[in-house]
Image: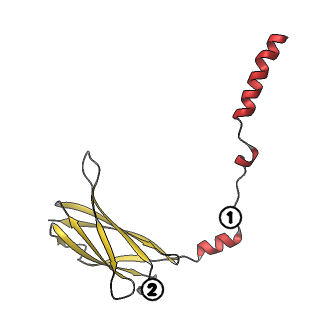
Amino acid sequence: MKKLILILLPLSLLAIACSPAQSDTQTTSPTPTETAQNKQESTATVNLVSPDPQAEIPMGDAEMILEVVDSNGNRVKVENLDVSATMPMDGMEDMMGKVEVTPADEPGRFKATTYFGMQGTWNVVASVKDPQYQAQQEFTVEVK
């Protein structure tokens, strides 16, 4: 009997120690206020105005004009636009190009300057960073 207690006691303590705490197992659902606040964000679209996405871009320094529009196609003023440029590389990490983004004179328009250091297919991703609007758009450009 003593041997059984000596075996069961450590196993019981181990089972209790490994079980999740009661507070860890409870999940909370968002309150109606939180849900309403999240739904106030509007979806926008980012368009590549220049250069034409179908045209070939020369290797080297490049300037892109991007605009953020609402569902009606009207430009909207947003706080920030984040733009990245990457080139997929077989068997290696993607090549990344530094992109500098500045607001243009017109609301909702941005100028993105980068350096395409290699010929090939580049992926440009633009993400809106704004409390009112939400958007992410990917463009594929050919650099020659």
Q: Viewed as shown, does residue 116 lie left or right of 10?
A: left
Residue drawn at (30%, 71%) of the image: 100
Q: Say which quadrant the N terminus sits in.
A: top right
Q: In which quarter of the image is residue 107?
A: bottom left
| Mark 1 Cα shell of 10 Å, populated few (<14), some (14-19), many (≥20) | few
Q: Where is residue 61 in the image (x, y as percent from the top left)?
A: 18, 70
* Residue 30: numbered disc: 1
Mark 1 belongs to which amino acid?
Answer: Pro
Q: How far apart are marks 2 and 1 (CA)?
A: 31 Å
Q: Where is residue 135 in the image (x, y as percent from the top left)?
A: 44, 72
Which residue was labeled with disc 2? 72
Residue drawn at (71%, 36%) of the image: 19
| Mark 2 Cα shell of 10 Å, populated few (<14), some (14-19), many (≥20) | few
Residue drawn at (62%, 74%) of the image: 37
First in residue order: circle 2 vs circle 1: 1
**Given this view, does label 2 or label 1 mark the residue nearer the observer?**
1
Give the vertical position of 94 relative to 31 (above or below): above
Q: Quadrant of residue 83?
A: bottom left
Q: Viewed as shown, does residue 60 lie left or right of 102?
A: left
Q: Where is residue 60 in the image (x, y as percent from the top left)?
A: 16, 67
Give the vertical position of 64 relative to 28 (above or below): below
Residue drawn at (40%, 86%) of the image: 75
Q: What element carries label 1?
A: loop
Q: How many marks?
A: 2
Nearer to the camera, 108 or 105: 105
Q: Quadrant of residue 112?
A: bottom left
Q: Say which quadrant the C terminus sits in.
A: bottom left
Q: What element carries label 2?
A: loop
Give the vertical position of 111 relative to 126 (above or below): below
Q: Viewed as shown, does residue 106 lie left or right of 32?
A: left
